Image (cartoon, rainbow, N blue to C red):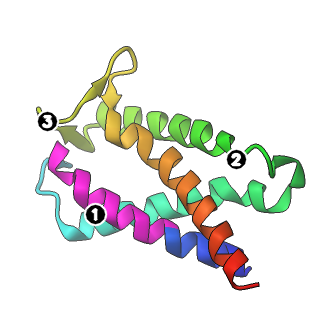
Amino acid sequence: MKKIGTIFILAFVFNVIWENIHAILYASYKGGEITQFILLRASLFDAIVITLLLLPFLFFSFLENKKWLILLIGILIAVVNEWYGLTTSRWVYNSLMPIVPFIEVGLTPMLQLGLLGYLVMVTQDAVLQRQK
């Protein structure tokens, strides 16, 4: 349970930082301004997704040496989430957002869940290793 809590807290903190940095690449959320409340809510959602993504890596030993899958699965989840958000006009990119060819999603949101998920897992391992 301690590992899950650590993962969630790390995921939330990392996502708050990420969301605030890349918020400048968005024009709007649901047609309105992107506020700190929206960024915190997005960070909470992303922290929950990352926590759920990492659960199998905590409980199944055969995944111990396959942490690279976190990157792949996180990116796939992010692409699907971006397609949903863009097609329903929940959010709109501005002209600064680098777009990934062929899949037509923003680069930073596409990488977010995979990179931060992997970083959370590695950081969590290091934190818990230090406590031993």
Identity, as a three-letter code, of the amino acid under mark 1: Leu
Q: Is residue 105 visible?
A: yes
Q: Which residue is mark 1?
A: 39
How crowded pointer 2 is (Cα within 10 Å; few <14, some 14-19, many 20+) is rated as some
Identity, as a three-letter code, of the amino acid under mark 2: Lys
Identity, as a three-letter code, of the amino acid under mark 3: Leu
Q: Residue at x 56, y 57 (%)?
A: 50
Q: Secondary structure at mark 1?
A: helix
Q: Which residue is mark 2?
A: 67
How crowded pointer 3 is (Cα within 10 Å; few <14, some 14-19, many 20+) is rated as few
The tally of labels here is 3
> Which of the numbered marks, if any, corresponds to residue 22?
none
Query: Residue 37's spot in the image, x, y percent?
Result: 24, 70
Magenta-drawn segment? 11-28
Q: Which residue is mark 3?
A: 96
Residue furthest out toward the top: 102
Query: Is residue 109 positioned above or below 64 on the image?
Result: above
Mark 1 touching mark 2, by CB under 8 A? no
Mark 3 touching mark 2, by CB under 8 A? no
